[in-house]
Amino acid sequence: KQEVTQIPAALSVPEGENLVLNCSFTDSAIYNLQWFRQDPGKGLTSLLLIQSSQREQTSGRLNASLDKSSGRSTLYIAASQPGDSATYLCAVTKTTDSWGKLQFGAGTQVVVTP
Amino acid sequence: NAGVTQTPKFQVLKTGQSMTLQCAQDMNHNSMYWYRQDPGMGLRLIYYSASEGTTDKGEVPNGYNVSRLNKREFSLRLESAAPSQTSVYFCASTPRGGNTEAFFGQGTRLTVV
């Protein structure tokens, strides 16, 4: 059974520092991996989608890497801002599942202090 | 552009009561999903609908039923609510299954007393 883990559960950094968020998964047979952002009391917003054949994806200040062989993905957020404060979740889709069922980690709660 | 819309946003039920959570998407997506989110845990899949006319169980389907009314709408029903079903429920959709990003609604916060 696929298990997705995010450590640490919470993180606080001063504004301007780079953020590094980790996601690990036990079964490397994944179709893709997504990073989401969740603001308090809100739904999830997809930030980046990495296909299993890709090593990384970039969008603005965000960069996500994927290492299937080691079962790890890292989300980098450059020059953090207070507006980056949120919970970040990663989720994987299994290779055998073409219907997009997501297996989530519990998330990392990020606070960026001014 | 509304995206994925869920109603209601908040609900309090007594144990044993029934209710239906509504979800509609206006993006012409084929696949729709219901997840629940509990403190300290990631989201867990309850049911999904790969395409109009089909539904299937996810990881935690017990105590729930679903209906894919048409391509736009996917409802989740609790027939006899239990305190263990206190959670935040999210509906999501994707254009065509697993190869694309998922879009989520704002969630329904359900409390069963």
Image: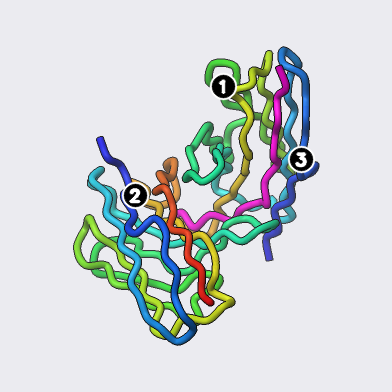
Q: Residue at x 61, y 61 (%)?
A: B38
Q: Residues within 10 Å of mark 2 (few under 14, many from 20)?
A: some
Query: What distance separates the C-alpha of mark 2 from that of mark 3?
Result: 34 Å
Label 3 sits on a secondary structure element that is strand
Q: Write down the region rendered in magenta.
A: A100-114
Label 2 sits on a secondary structure element that is loop
Q: Between label 2 and label 3, give the one nearer the viewer.
A: 3
Q: Residue at x 27, y 54 (%)?
A: B24
Query: What distance separates the C-alpha of mark 3 from that of mark 1?
Result: 23 Å
Q: Is residue B80 above or below residue A96?
A: below
Q: Which residue is mark 2?
A: B96
Would residue B69 be found to the left or right of residue A66 on screen? left
Q: Chain of mark 2?
A: B
Estimate the x, y position of residue A61 in percent, counting from the top left: 59, 16
The residue under label 2 is which amino acid type? Arg
Q: Chain of mark 3?
A: A
Q: Between label 3 and label 1, give the one nearer the viewer.
A: 3
The residue under label 1 is which amino acid type? Thr
Q: Residue at x 31, y 67 (%)?
A: B75
Q: Which residue is mark 3?
A: A10
Q: Which mark is residue A58?
A: 1
Q: Residues within 10 Å of mark 3 (few under 14, many from 20)?
A: some
Query: What distance separates the C-alpha of mark 1 from that of mark 2?
Result: 23 Å
Q: Residue at x 74, y 46 (%)?
A: A6
Would residue B105 be found to the left or right of residue A93 on screen? left
Choose between A106 and B59: the one closer to the eye: A106
